[in-house]
Image (spheres, helix red, strand yellow):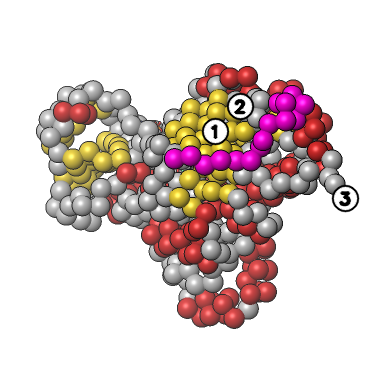
Amino acid sequence: MTPTPRQEKREPEIVIIGAGIAGITMAYTLQGAGYSRFRVLEKGSDVGGVWYWNRYPGLTCDVPSQLYQFGFAPKADWSSIWAPGPEIQRYHRDVVDKFGLDEHIQLNTTVVSADFDDASALWTVVTDTGETILADFVICATGVLHNPAYPNIPGLAEFKGKVVHTARWDESLDVDGARIAVIGTGSTGVQVVSALQQPARSLTHFVRSPQWVLWAPMHLRQPKLVSRILERSPGLHAWIYAMSLKASAVLPDVILNDTWRRRAVQKYARLCLRRQVQDRQLRESLTPDYEPLCKRQVVSGTYYRALRSANTELVTTDIARVTEEGIQTVDGREFPLDIIVLATGFRAHDYMRPMRITGREGRQLDEIWADGPRAYRMTAIPGLPNLFTVLGPNSPTGSISLQYSAEVTSRYILSWLDKFRVGEISTTEVTEEATEEFNREVNSAAKTTVWNSGCNSWYFTDSGNIDLWPFTRSKLTEMLTQPNESHFRVTRRQEEREAAGGINLASQRKG
Ligand code: NAP
C-alpha cells in the first residue's frame, strides 16, 4: 500500500537541550519508545545539571535519596538517607551509562539560538561550536536553577580576596584558616555555612532575611543491611518508592491547605529555633518576619550549631559596600576578609535564556515572555510550534518530586512525537487561549498557598506571579496524561506540503 502524504511515517529529528534531571528523563523516554534520532546538547562537561554545576562544600540534597531518584533507575545503596551532592552527581552519570544514553549526548556544547522556519516547519539549532542542526522538535530541558544570580553590591569587583558563587565553586579554593563571609541564607547558604565554619578562621554570615530552618538528622547513614535488602528485592524497592511518592503528598497538602498539618510543621519550625538557639539576641536576629513554609523550606541539622560557634558571627545589618579588604555594613563596621562566598541563588525564571529562541512568524521568546515566563501545563509555549519544555515554568520545585514531574512530562511530549511519527501531525502549537486559561487557574490557586503568605522569595516573578505548581500531584498527572488537541493548533503533513510546495523535510546536519 502506498502511504498518502497524511499517513507518511517518519521518525522525527529531535534536539534536547540540557542533560540534567529533565534531559536525562526525556532521553530515556525516547529511547524506551524506540526513537533513535535524538541528540542531547549539554553545556557542561558532564551530565547532571544542578548536580554537575553545584560543588560547594556541604552540598547535600535535603530530599531523602530514596525519593530523589528516577522512578526508572532505583538505586538501592545510597550512602545516606540524604545523600551528598557528589554521590547524586555520580548517580546521574551512572544512569546515563547504564541505559547507554551517552551516544546521544554531546557535552561542552552551549546552544546559542533556535529558530523555527514556517515554510519547512523545521527548527535550526545553532551551538557555540558553530554547528547547525535541523530538527523537527526542540525540547528544552534547561532547568530552573542554572543561571547564578550575582548581587549588585558596590565595590564587589574591587575586593582583593577571592569571590566565589556557590553554583560555580572553585575547587582550588583553600578555605582552611581563611576569614570567610557567606552572603545569603537559602538552602545553599545554610549548607555552606555549616560546612565552612570548622575550617574557617572566622566565618561571618550576612543575612538579609532570616529563614526558618527545620532540624533533621542530615548525616544519618542508610544502613548497609537496608541497601542489601533493597538490592535483592527490586519489587520491595519499587513498592517503597511508590509509597514514598504517595507519602510526599503531604508537602503539596501543607502548601495548599491551611490545616492542622501545615500548622504542625510551622510549630515544629518555631520549636527548632527556640530549642537550638538559647541566646535571646541571636534568636531574635534569626526570627523571620513571615510564616514558616512561605519560602522554600530550609532543612539542616547543623546550621544553628555552626552559628553558635566561637568563630562565627551572624550579621543582619545591611551591607553598604565591599572594599578591597572586606565588607562594610551600613553602620560603618568593617569585616576584613579573605573569601566572599555568594550564596545568593539563581535567576530562576530565566529558563532557556540566554539562548535566543525565535518561533512562528519570527516571534521571539523574549517578546512572548515580556510579562514573565508562562507555559501551558509546564511544557508548551504559544508561538513556539514543536517546542516543549521539561521542568519548565510552574514546575513543582517546591512541592512534588521533580523526577516524577519530568517523567510524566516526557511521556506527555512522547504522545505528540508519536503523532508525528505515524504521520498524523506535522506541527503542534499550544493556543494562546489555553495557555491563558491555565495561567489564570494557576494564579488563582497560588493566591491561597502558603507561598503567598507574606514573604519575598525566588518563587515570585517580576510581575508578581508565583512560578510554581499550586496543585496536587494527581492534578499534575491528570493534566499531562493525554494531549488535548483542542488546546493546540495542529497542522497535518498534507497541509504543510501544500503550503511549502513539497519541501523535503529530511533533517540535515551542518557543522
Ligand atoms: P535562594 O533561596 O534564592 O537564597 C538566596 C539568598 O541570598 C537569600 O537569603 C537572599 O536574601 C540572599 N541575597 C540575594 N541577593 C542578596 C544581596 N544583594 N544582599 C544580601 N543577600 C542577598 O538561593 P539558594 O539558597 O541557592 O537556593 C535556591 C534553591 O535551590 C532552593 O530554594 C532550593 O530549591 C534549591 N536548593 C536545594 C537544595 C537541596 O538540598 N535540595 C540545596 C540548595 C539549594 P533575601 O531572602 O533577602 O532575598
Between the residue at mark 3 and the residue at mark 2, the CA separation in whole angstroms equals 32 Å
Q: Mainly helix, strand or loop, the magenta region?
A: loop
- Circle 1/circle 2 CB separation < 8 Å: yes
Which residue is tagged 2? 117
Which residue is found at the position 59% from the left and 28% from the top? Answer: 116
In front: 110, or 335? 110
In front: 479, or 278? 479
Q: Nearer the viewer, mark 3 or mark 2?
A: 3
Q: Which residues are magenta?
A: 497-511
Is 502 inside the magenta-drawn segment?
A: yes
> Which secondary structure, mark 2?
strand
Quadrant in which the C terminus appears: top left
Judge left or right: residue 252 versus residue 69: right
Is 409 inside the magenta-drawn segment?
A: no
Mark 2 burial class by Cα count in 10 Å: few <14, some 14-19, many 20+: some
Q: Amino acid at mark 2?
A: Asp
Residue 105 lies, in percent from the top left, at 49, 52
Give residue 124's mark. Answer: 1
Which residue is found at the position 48% from the left and 27% from the top? Answer: 356
Q: Amino acid at mark 3?
A: Met
Mark 3 burial class by Cα count in 10 Å: few <14, some 14-19, many 20+: few
> Which secondary structure, mark 1?
strand
Give residue 148's mark. Answer: none
Looking at the image, is 112 positioned above or below residue 401? Answer: above
Which residue is tagged 3? 1
Which residue is found at the position 12% from the left and 30% from the top? Answer: 324
Quadrant in which residue 383 is drawn:
top right
Q: Amino acid at mark 1?
A: Thr
Looking at the image, is 243 positioned above or below residue 484? Answer: below
